[in-house]
Image: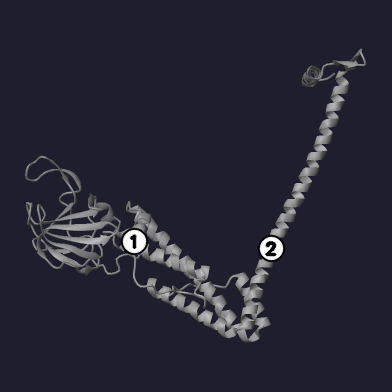
Amino acid sequence: MPSKSAGALLQRLRTAFPDREFIMRSQGQVRFIRVSSRAQKIAVGAVCGLFGTWAASVGALALSQASAGSDSAALAARAASVAKAESRVAKYRSDVDATMADLERRQQFITQVVDAHIQEVPEEPEAAQPTAETAATTRKVSVAVPAAGTLADIEAKQLALVDRLTRYADQRSSAATESIRKLGLNPDAMLSRARMAEGGPLVKLATAANGSVDPRFMKMGRSLARMDALERGLASIPQVSPAHVAYVSSSYGYRSDPFTGGAAFHAGLDFPGPMGSPIYAAAKGRVTFVGQKTGYGNCIEVTHGNGLMTRYGHLSGFRTRVGQEIDAGALIGAMGSTGRSTGPHLHFEVRVNDRPVNPRPFLEAAQRLQGANKGATGGQEENH
C-alpha cells in the first residue's frame, strides 16, 4: 500500500496533468482529440530526458574547453619562460661586452640607491638565493656561452639582492606605518606632504644602455624611498621628554586658570623644576622661532616637518638660534618663569598644522618606537 507522501505526489501529478481534449477543425469537420494524463507524463519525461542529455553534453564541452584553456595558459607561461631564457642566451652570445656594461649600470643603480637610503646592505642569516627561473636562465647561458657563465651568475645574484632589499624596505615601512598610526597620525598624509615640495637637478638612473630601468630595480627604489620618507616622518614626531622632572603640574585640556580661577583651556603640559633646569628638543627639526610671545614669555619653536611643531615657553634663557638644525634631545634652553607664569616651569606644546594636540600620547609612546631618534641623548623619562 503506497505511503501518504507517495499518494500525495500522485495526486499532484494528476492535478498537474489532467486528461485534456483539443478541438481540431479540418475541411469543415470538427474533431475532438483526447490526450490522457498518462500520455502527457510520458511526453514530459521524454523532454526532460532530452534536456538532461543536452545539458550534460554542454557541461562536458565546457569542462573540456576550460581544461584546454588551462593547459594553453600553462604552455604559454612555459613558452614565455623559455623565450625569456633564450633571449638572455642570445644577448650574451651576441655581445658579452654590452651585457657586462648593463651589469655595471645595474650595480651602480643598487649602490647609489642603497647609499642614499640605508648606507649598507642588511645582513641575513642566509644569503638570498636566485629564483628558480633566474637559476634556470643562468644554467642555459652557461651551457650556451661558457665564457659568459660568470656574468650570468653575477646577474642572478644582483636580482636576488634587489628582491631582498625590496622586502627589507617594505618590512621597515610597515613597522614605521604602524608606529605612526599608534600616535594618531596618518602616514599617507605624511607621504603626500613630503611629495609636495620636491625638486633639484635631474640625475637619471638607468639599468640599460637605452636609459630604461628594469621594473624590479624600479620597485626596489620606490620601496626604499617610501621607507626613508616614513622613517624620517617618524623621527620628526615628538617623543623625547623636554624636561627631566618627576611629574607634570598641569595637564592638557580643561583647568581653572591660575590667575583668574575661571574655566580655561590649557594647550600643553607644564613641567615644574628648578630655575635654569635644561630644556631639550622633543624631536629632531629646525628652530624657527626664538624670542618672546605674549603669555609664553621667552619662547622657542621647533618645526619638525609634516605639519608638526613644538613650542617651549616661560624660559629663562636660550641655547639655540633660529635656523639651527637640531637632533631630538638637543639642549635648546633653560627653565624659567617668564611671561604669564606663577613659578619656574616649562610650558610644552605640540601643534599639528598650528592646532594644539595633547603631547602626552607622543611622550608615552617613546619606548614603543623602533629605530627613531638616533641622535637622542640618554636619560629621558616618561611623564605620567
**Neighbourhood count class around disc 2 (C-alpha, 10 Å): few under 14, some 14–19, many 20 upward:** few
- Residue at the image position 36 percent from the left and 57 percent from the top: 192
- Rendered location of residue 259, percent (x, y): 6, 45
Residue found at the far front of this picture: 27
Q: Look at the image and tell me whether residue 126 can be seen.
A: no
Q: Is residue 58 above or below residue 296?
A: above
The picture places residue 255, in percent across and down from the top left corner, at 15, 43
Identify the image quadrant of residue 375. bottom left
Q: Position of residue 31 (x, y in %)?
A: 91, 14
On screen, residue 321 above or below 337: below
Q: Are marks 2 and 1 in contact (CB under 8 Å)?
A: no
Residue at 87% x, 26% y is: 42
Kindly identify the amino acid type of the residue bearing the numbered disc 1: Ala
For disc 2, the marked residue is 76
Question: Of helix, strand and loop, which one carries label 2?
Answer: helix
Tell me if 66 is positioned left or right of 205 in this view.
right
Q: Is residue 78 left or right of residue 316?
A: right
Residue beneath disc 1: 194
The CA span between labels 2 and 1 is 43 Å
Earlier in the chain: of badge 2 and badge 1, it is: 2
Determine which quarter of the picture holds residue 115: bottom left
- Residue appearing at x 23%, y 63% in the figure: 380
Say which amino acid is labelled 2.
Ala
Q: Quadrant of the N terminus?
A: top right
Left or right: residue 368 compared with residue 332:
right
Which residue occupies the foreground of this view, 306 or 348? 306
